[in-house]
Amino acid sequence: MRRAACNSSPLQALATKGSSPRHAVRGFSSSVRKLGASPFVNEPTKPVMHTSIPGPKSKAAIKKLDNVFDTRSLNMLVDYPKCNGNYVVDGDGNTLLDVFAQIASIPVGYNNPELAKVASSPAMVNAIINRPALGNFPSADWAEILETGILRAAPKGLDQVFTATTGSDANETAYKAAFIWRRTQERGGKDFSAEEIDSAMVNQAPGAPNYSILSFSRGFHGRLFGSLSTTHSKPIHKLDIPAFDWPTAPFPQLRYPLDQFAAENRAEEERCLAEFERIVSTFHNPVVAAVVEPIQSEGGDNHASLYFFQGLRRITKKHNVLLIIDEVQTGVGATGKFWAHEHWNLDSPPDMVTFSKKAQAAGFYYTDKSLRPDKPYRQFNTWMGDPARALLFRGIYNEIERHGLVEQAARVGKYLYGKLDALTQRYPNEIRNLRGKDRGTFLAWDSPRRDEIVRSAKAKGVNIGGSGESTIRLRPMLVFKEHHADILVDTLETIFKA
Amino acid sequence: MRRAACNSSPLQALATKGSSPRHAVRGFSSSVRKLGASPFVNEPTKPVMHTSIPGPKSKAAIKKLDNVFDTRSLNMLVDYPKCNGNYVVDGDGNTLLDVFAQIASIPVGYNNPELAKVASSPAMVNAIINRPALGNFPSADWAEILETGILRAAPKGLDQVFTATTGSDANETAYKAAFIWRRTQERGGKDFSAEEIDSAMVNQAPGAPNYSILSFSRGFHGRLFGSLSTTHSKPIHKLDIPAFDWPTAPFPQLRYPLDQFAAENRAEEERCLAEFERIVSTFHNPVVAAVVEPIQSEGGDNHASLYFFQGLRRITKKHNVLLIIDEVQTGVGATGKFWAHEHWNLDSPPDMVTFSKKAQAAGFYYTDKSLRPDKPYRQFNTWMGDPARALLFRGIYNEIERHGLVEQAARVGKYLYGKLDALTQRYPNEIRNLRGKDRGTFLAWDSPRRDEIVRSAKAKGVNIGGSGESTIRLRPMLVFKEHHADILVDTLETIFKA
């Protein structure tokens, strides 16, 4: 049952600590050009299907699982020790090419041997069994773990990090930082008033101010109470859950192909920017920050141009509003840059960038030390992240660097986009509004019979995800190569033909 | 630098899977009587101090860490691989008896050898490097991992679990379950209305209803936006952060010694129950659930009697309000029962019980399948907990069972309470309102010079935590024994004498 690489690899110290100074690796995605061999020696060469999914073994196991765990959202029961590279193996031994990758969160392939070394190192064992309360009792090597890992991956211009545990709490702690920053600025050095202290304790203004975070229609930023108040992807995510009275600005709805609708799309983005500025400057609950995804992922892979994002940066600067870029799904390489917002050539960096998923660790980057609250214990919790996951992220970063996986995602994405574009010519009713050109493998299109296509692909051994109302989104891992793209495209064509 | 037990133990499969059926181990805390030997072979016999804290090495490392990580809440820089059992070792080699235990979250001692085996097992390596999106792609053995671990620890009457990652999100997902449950009940089988769907997407009622979670004055339930709206421990936790208009009921303020103030305390609890019922039945934002800690931990170790908690259960049942017991800090044995609310002899179990900290995993237990939402994807997120932490909790549970650590906490707590009570007689100005009789080692008292006592104890090699305004709280691990209690009490007496 267990993967050979795990069983046979001895406990081994992590020998891959970064030696280069952090600042030297800024601009990582353009500076690293090593295109090494695949890390997987026995990766399957194609999907192999033995049964329909779920097969008999999976059905029995799902029935048992349902006694204690809600299985209605279950897609596939997975035998993780048997998975390898880009291939996922289900409970009946079916082997599928995985271009969904645990909702875009497996970075460098299943059972990556280098990550197995990190995970079985004494440092990892120590991190797991002695989990610290990081804010009070950080380990003596916490600075080194951050500097040789999470901070080497930091976007240009941001050199501080607040570690968290999930994408939702990465966003919520970033929002808290924004509220604290704004109110501290407004107090101008004065201490809290008695009225603020008393009212905060019972959830009332001015201590708990009626301030807000602006988000965009169709955006997704998480599902806890604060993050859900900024999420507008699907009603089922939000129904019955109380929400803050925070504003929503329109996100551009672009028309495809982009080159045929350049003027209309520019007008649409100008309309959205004007509405954004109007809300930022007039909303009844003052806006302290705007949060936006570089590509709205759960909401259906909605893109906007550099012009739009540059406009957001300009307008937020003008109105003393922070700009938070949510890179939970877009971050860590898949768009062909390490961070998707690096495509935008901003004049000044975002104020905060949040991450999770493929980082396998979570948190937010920032630069301005004024986003460190004026007093301790304002941004604090018991664990404040997880050194075990920070060690893993370091291993992931090293693996990305060693194999040039960001450049590979750019290259393979270009190849795959070309093949999909050609397929669009032949099956214009099957692939509509193909999106993600020059955004690596972060590709998507609208499909009039999306759920049927996803089901058929699974039956043929390719695991694909949907998003939004009718979107098929591709979220392969960073180890996805041209020959994997061929299998994906051939499978799609077989389905379209049938 | 590294602990021998980690370096020398070979990769080893977790050989301690529970074989007894889950229901047979209900009432765990009274049925397990094995009082085995200590799991630590070379645990220090006493504190050893080489320098003041922070010493020169720590000072240099803290200065470096502060460049990238806020260190103003830092208590001590720790050399985790050198820690052993109840002893924490700092960056200068100072060895302290730790009765704070990472804010009450280390369960069975630093570098516990059995946990080291779990952490270096192939199952753990697999869980770390192939982290699943559990709601979509659970592992084939997820039911077994839950049933032999997290669910064996389930409180009596609760047999379902929703896994999460931190105490805050355990509480927030429990709150979401409560809101969904109530609104589903109110719709009486009807589907969402168009008005609900449209309004939810823009954060307005009725889709995002103005319903509420009731919490108690001085309670602590986390620091994200929903959980923080139920937290009322200290202003610094809440200031400048927007909050929901949710109600606060008074938590009893008992007078000590309890036997001298029996009538006054009963009157106080009746006052609080009456006020609770008034708020539950009249608050303008309808109350769907009440959340309460068995012992208010961050708020200063505030206790209430069985009478009060039984009253909460009675009143919540009467008004169709759910009762959520937050056992994030009180759970997993330290009070002398596995769950603190098991002290209460409730007629019917709580609706949900949340856990984290010493479980090293997080989530909430519940029983009623109506707390499974009526549709999938309503309670959902990418990771939905962490199998790596579920494996660790299983190891923790096995270790607690093997050594009878719940009974040990009860026994050692009784011993320690007796010694502290005697100390109170001699130093009545130093120890006031001693609390936690018959609650294991979960002991606390008020100290007129709290911060000074905590500082002095640290200088003498005992790490103690505070809470509330002037409370000293003891939070030893479950491997804390009588001879550790002696060192603690002797150190306190030395300080009081000086």
Image (spheres, coloured by chain):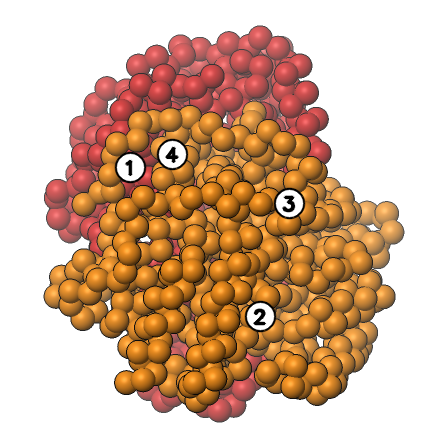
Chain colours: A red, B orange
Counting residues from the start of the chain, the first of labels 2 and 1 encountered is: 1
- The reply to whether residue A447 is visible in this rendering is no
**Is there a contact, CB below 8 Å, between mark 2 and mark 1?**
no
Cβ–Cβ under 8 Å for marks 2 and 4: no
Task: Determine the secondary structure under disc 4.
Answer: helix
Q: Are marks 2 and 1 on the same chain?
A: yes
Q: On the rendered image, what quadrant is the N terminus of chain B found in?
A: top left
Q: Earlier in the sequence, mark 3 or mark 2?
A: 3
Marks 3 and 4, Cα distance to the nearest angstrom? 26 Å
Q: Do labels 3 and 2 share a chain?
A: yes
Q: Do the residues labelled 3 and 4 touch (CB within 8 Å)?
A: no
Q: Name the residue under label 4.
A: B117
User: How many other residues sit within 10 Å of disc 4, few (<14), some (14-19) or many (≥20)?
Assistant: many
Q: Residues within 10 Å of mark 2 (few under 14, many from 20)?
A: some
Numbered disc 4: what chain? B
- The residue sitting at 84% across, 57% down in the picture is B186
Q: Which mark is residue B31?
A: 3
Q: Are marks 2 and 4 on the same chain?
A: yes
The numbered mark, 3 or 4, whose residue comes first in the sequence reads 3
Label of residue B6 in the image: 1
Residue beneath disc 2: B437
